[in-house]
Image: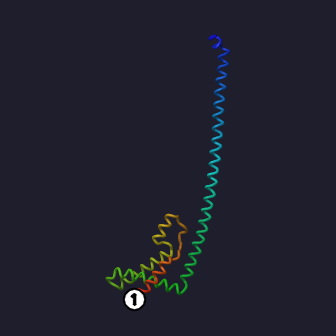
Amino acid sequence: MFKDLLSPQNTFIYGVVLCGIFLVQSLWGHWKTKRELKRYKGMLSDKLDLDSKQSQDINKERNALKQENENLRMQVARLNERSDNKMQRELEILARAEKQMVISAPGFAPAWEMAKSAALGQLENEEKGQSFPQKIFRKLIGSGSAQTNVALPESAASAAKNGEATASAA
């Protein structure tokens, strides 16, 4: 009986059956890998579509903000041309210069002129968008155009009123 199991015909049949088992296993693994690859490709294309849409939305928002920034810059320039705003700006410069003079008052005339020019430079930098807080925001959020002008905050108007009170007191 044991001799019948090891006969050449039986060993050939055993080899064919074993080969068939390995073939089925390898085909099953291949189909499984194909399905997984197809699933990964679908996930990747979905992710790329979402990233593309998000990038387009960000670009649209960036362009809208650029346009709004340009409009605001033009409005600030137009408002700065009005005579009452020029006076208020000059008053703000004088108030800032006076504040700096109170801090350092050894030689009043030269120090006054230096303080006045420094205040003018500060104000121009703020109008161009180059003040310290705006530099920080630009680094955090990203840079817009190279030459951006922004409106002065409302605190500058209140500081001008306070400066007006100190200027009239002096």
Q: Position of residue 131 (x, y in %)?
A: 47, 72
Q: Position of residue 9 (x, y in %)?
A: 68, 15
Q: Residue at x 65, y 24 (%)?
A: 19
At mark 1, the secondary structure is helix
Looking at the figure, which quarter contains the N terminus?
top right
Q: Nearer the viewer, residue 108 or 68?
A: 68
Instruction: Look at mark 1 in the image and give the residue it sits on.
Output: 169
Q: Nearer the viewer, residue 19 or 81?
A: 19
**Quadrant position of residue 53:** bottom right
Is 85 placed left or right of 169 in the picture?
A: right
Q: Residue at x 32, y 84 (%)?
A: 107
Amino acid type for the residue under numbered disc 1: Ala
Q: Nearer the viewer, residue 49 or 1?
A: 1
Is 47 placed left or right of 139 in the picture?
A: right
Vertical order, 42 against 23 (above or below): below
Q: Position of residue 20 (x, y in %)?
A: 67, 25
Q: Position of residue 67 (x, y in %)?
A: 60, 71
Q: Residue lying at the far left in this picture: please name it.
A: 106
Vertical order, 67 against 57 (above or below): below
